[in-house]
């Protein structure tokens, strides 16, 4: 990974030139097509959107319809898992292979330090609490009465679908759902958005800019208007983790922890979820939680950045 400090050394953009030749130095399908990396990223998004959302989603709809019930939920989970692998992960790997002969080097599959792992886990937990508070405040925004029934019906359908997918009663079932909902998407989506899309957009927008663009696309790709802002924040954070640590493993870990917390929280709150809420959440308490969790998340980011810089410096000293 090329540091911004290196990019501006000697008043030249030499690392940017090195980054550019990385896309064209190998005899690959991509180099022969002579496409701009950002154009390739857009075409890749279109292809995978068609495969995953249209083809994969269409097959699931044909098999199960809109009936997400306890009778067929296990089959839907299995279909979801194979859909992620067949229509998202494998096409992503193929598209990356069109660009490079070394997939793992291209996506920056590099080890990270124990301290970085620790700060990522704590930071994600704090960030999720902050975003949950945001969703509470977002739900308090009044919706025009003319469209309120329509909006509420969509919201209920999405929530019911998700709860049916992750609601479990036993520990073995919980472990399987963690694998389907947390582990498989962490690898599949991160290889797509941080390994392929962000990597290509970095060519046009720089290292940090590519992370932001990929994060916004990550949120839009989920097709959920009610969690658009939290998904956008998480997507940008995942991208910046790759930018700061130089490793996609940081984003995969953060993605996995985020989804894991969501699944486990539903498991331990399953009785509460089945009952209607009796009181509205207190705004003051929500804001206090957001402030505390926000401070913890920012602190973890600062400490993570320091740990990543120290690791890179130690690696450079060992190589000299």
Image (cartoon, rainbow, N blue to C red):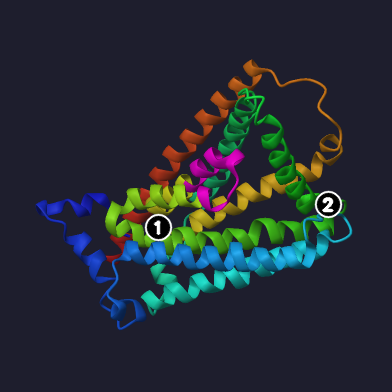
Q: Considering depth in this image, is 274 or 270 the residue closer to the camera?
A: 274
Describe residue 285's horizontal placement relative to residue 33 as left or right.
right
Name the foreground residue: 310 vs 270.
270
Q: Is residue 191 visible?
A: yes
Dividing the picture into quarters, in which one does residue 279 lie? top right
Q: Is residue 250 left or right of residue 318?
A: right
Q: How many numbered marks have been drawn onto this rendered protein structure?
A: 2
Farthest residue in the top direction?
Answer: 284
Q: Give the dominant element type of the magenta stretch: helix, strand or loop.
A: helix
Residue displayed at 21% across by 54% down: 6
Q: Which mark is residue 198?
A: 1
Front residue (pair 133, 157)? 157
Q: Which percent across, then down, holds residue 310?
A: 36, 49
* Mark 2 → mark 1, Cα distance in angstroms: 35 Å
Residue 47 part of the magenta-drawn span: no
Please check the rendered image and state whether residue 225 is part of the magenta-colored stretch, yes or no: yes
Specify start and end residues of the magenta stretch as a single range: 219-235
When asked about the image quadrant of residue 58, the answer is: bottom right
What's the residue at 20%, 54% (across, down)? 7
Using the image as rendered, state which of residue 181 and residue 228 is in the foreground: 228
Can you tell which mark lies on residue 168? 2
Q: Earlier in the sequence, mark 2 or mark 1?
A: 2
Quadrant of the drawing holding the C terminus: bottom left
Local secondary structure at mark 2: loop
Q: Which image quarter is the N terminus in?
A: bottom left
Q: Is residue 199 left or right of residue 206?
A: right
The vertical placement of 202 against 121, above or below, is below
One can see residue 110 in this view: no
In this picture, is 97 found above or below 196? below
């Amino acid at each position: 990974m090329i540091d911004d400090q290196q990019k501006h050394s000697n008043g030249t953009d030499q690392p940017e030139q090195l980054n550019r030749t990385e896309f064209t130095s190998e005899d690959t399908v991509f180099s022969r097509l002579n496409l701009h990396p950002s154009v390739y990223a857009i075409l890749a998004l279109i292809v995978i959107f068609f495969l995953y959302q249209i083809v994969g989603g269409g097959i699931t709809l044909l098999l199960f319809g809109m009936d997400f019930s306890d009778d067929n939920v296990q089959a839907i989970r299995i279909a979801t898992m194979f859909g992620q692998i067949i229509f998202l992960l494998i096409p992503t790997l193929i598209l990356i292979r069109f660009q490079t002969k070394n997939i793992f080097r291209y996506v920056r599959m590099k080890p990270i330090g124990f301290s970085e792992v620790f700060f990522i886990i704590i930071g994600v937990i704090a960030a999720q609490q902050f975003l949950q508070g945001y969703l509470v405040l977002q739900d308090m925004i009044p919706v025009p009465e003319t469209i309120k029934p329509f909006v509420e019906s969509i919201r209920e359908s999405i929530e019911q679908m998700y709860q049916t997918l992750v609601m479990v009663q036993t520990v073995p079932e919980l472990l399987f759902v963690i694998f389907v909902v947390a582990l498989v998407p962490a690898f599949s989506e991160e290889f797509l958005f941080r390994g392929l899309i962000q990597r290509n957009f970095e060519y046009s927008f720089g290292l940090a800019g590519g992370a932001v663009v990929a994060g916004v696309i990550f949120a839009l790709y989920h097709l959920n208007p009610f969690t658009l802002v939290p998904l956008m924040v998480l997507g940008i954070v995942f991208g910046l983790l790759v930018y700061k640590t130089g490793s996609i493993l940081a984003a995969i870990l953060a993605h996995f922890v985020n989804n894991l917390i969501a699944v486990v929280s539903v498991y331990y709150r399953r009785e509460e979820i089945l009952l209607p809420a009796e009181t509205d959440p207190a705004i003051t308490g929500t804001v206090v939680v957001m402030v505390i969790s926000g401070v913890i998340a920012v602190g973890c980011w600062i400490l993570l950045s320091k740990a990543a810089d120290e690791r890179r410096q130690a690696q450079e000293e060992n190589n000299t």
